[in-house]
Amino acid sequence: MHICVVGTGYVGLVTGACLADFGISVTCVDNDEAKIAKLLDGEIPIYEPGLDSLVEKNAKAGRLHFATELAPAIQNALAIFIAVGTPPKNDGSADLSYVVQVAESIADNLTGYKVVVTKSTVPIGTGQLIEKIISERTNGSHPFSVVSNPEFLREGSAIEDFMRPDRVVIGARDPQAIAIMKDIYSPLYLIETPFVITNVESSELIKYASNAFLATKITFINEVAELCERLGADVHHVARGMGLDKRIGPKFLHPGPGYGGSCFPKDTQAMTEIARDAGRPFKIVETVVEVNEKIKAGLIDRVRSAVGDSLSGKTVAVLGLSFKPETDDMRESPAIPLVETLVADGARIRAFDPVAMESARALLPPEVEYCSDSYDAVEGADAMVIVTEWNEFRSLDMERIRSSLKKAVVVDLRNVYKPDKMREQGFDYHSIGRSAKDLP
Ligand SMILES: NC(=O)c1ccc[n+]([C@@H]2O[C@H](COP(=O)([O-])OP(=O)(O)OC[C@H]3O[C@@H](n4cnc5c(N)ncnc54)[C@H](O)[C@@H]3O)[C@@H](O)[C@H]2O)c1
């Protein structure tokens, strides 16, 4: 079977490499010529653990191909996976222009029966829109089916998530398309992955509802953390006490600097737009979006109050720039507004991230100084701020950090360290939701 994956970004490249690893012949297409040139050269354009060896293995085996030309890839494929971006428009709704472009190209190159699969996160009704575009452009000359197959992988553990997902969701009407999708995912069938087979609209909504729910859970614990600070409680004890309840579960109950990344911010916004358009505003998610913005905006106050009244002329070491560990993705990273405000307030920034500094350069103010490691970043700084919980920040030599800092101030936005221990070591330590003084 031949498959074409259109869009070779975080989702498309992982999807293509994993499907090739299932034994399928895959062509990954992207209109970004530089990206494809890198891939043809054996270079992986993004940081994703394990992806380099998976791509290399399957390219060598002749199952994974890269191209910029869409037409031949469509003509040769039985199934075409659309994995292009669906970024937010100014009003928060999803920009479908890339998806529409691909649907038009598919229509123009339809040579026989094809399954058109949306892997991109798309608003409810997009499957119907794709069907309409293809039908109208081809005058019904060739049969095709549209399938929704949302992706749930997490950057940083994308391959494991794709190879061992909690579920595979397939939204389709046509039994032949469902059979082809089951065939594509047969290795997952064998390991007893649950399959949710439903209609296109339900499938499209499953993706948005899932992300909106997870963003709600994160925001919920972030608000609990703020309450803990006022009430003398410890958010980790509260989260553990809540999470042991099987109805709640322990995941996504870790407080932090507000959710970021390429999905939650845009998908929660899009969800509110979709609901408003449907005439039934989604109040909870609207509030989540608003609260998350407030939490992110409040980070600067945490740093300000830790450093002292004015940031002007102060040096702040920022550890971690990507929106989460194990990725170089900077999209909607909480580090961006934080660093921008610190620079605007006159602070000098010495930043370090294990993999995201190259992508950060394009997004952060030019004044930011990029350092060779954490110890280099804290040299002479008035405070150290941990923004991303990379593993290497969990076991820093704190004596060395203290002696390198000008002032022993640490703002830990990921609660990586223990407050008591940090204070014992002579730090003025600030974290999130841990005001309890009498923990047993
Ligand atoms: N990143 C994630 O963790 C994640 C997880 C689940 C779902 N998603 C969804 O998957 C989709 C893709 O996300 P991503 O993070 O991989 O995006 P991305 O920006 O990393 O990749 C998108 C790619 O599509 C390419 N592209 C755009 N238009 C094209 C066209 N007409 N022809 C060929 N290539 C084209 C771009 O050049 C880019 O390389 C989005 O809808 C996103 O919401 C993302």
Image: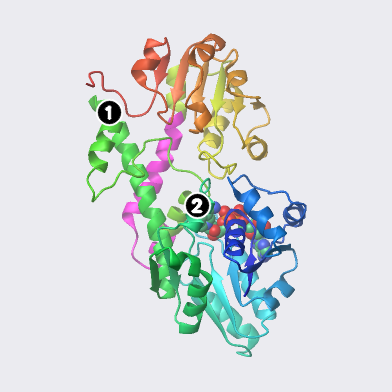
Taking the magenta stretch, the answer to whether it contains residue 284 is yes
**Which corner quadrant holds the C terminus?**
top left
Q: Residues within 10 Å of mark 1 (few under 14, many from 20)?
A: many
Give the amino acid type for the residue marked by disc 2 in the picture.
Glu
Q: Is residue 47 left or right of residue 38?
A: left
Q: Quadrant of residue 28?
A: bottom right
Q: Residue 344 in the image: state x and y as whole percent.
A: 58, 27
Taking the magenta stretch, the answer to whether it contains residue 275 is yes
Q: In the depicted view, which residue is nearer to us: 345 or 428? A: 428
Name the colouring of the figure.
rainbow
Q: Residue 68 in the image: state x and y as whole percent.
A: 74, 64
Residue denoted by label 1: 234
SS for tag 2?
helix
**Stretch in magenta:** 272-299
Give the amino acid type for the residue marked by disc 1 in the picture.
Asp
The residue drawn where x is 54% and y is 31% is 320
Q: In the depicted view, which residue is nearer to us: 439 or 303? A: 439
The residue drawn where x is 44% and y is 18% is 306
Q: Residues within 10 Å of mark 2 (few under 14, many from 20)?
A: some
**Which corner quadrant holds the N terminus?**
bottom right
One can see residue 124 in this view: no
Query: Which secondary structure class fits the magenta region best?
Result: helix
Q: Residue 203 in the image: state x and y as whole percent.
A: 42, 69
Residue denoted by label 2: 160
The residue drawn where x is 62% and y is 73% is 103
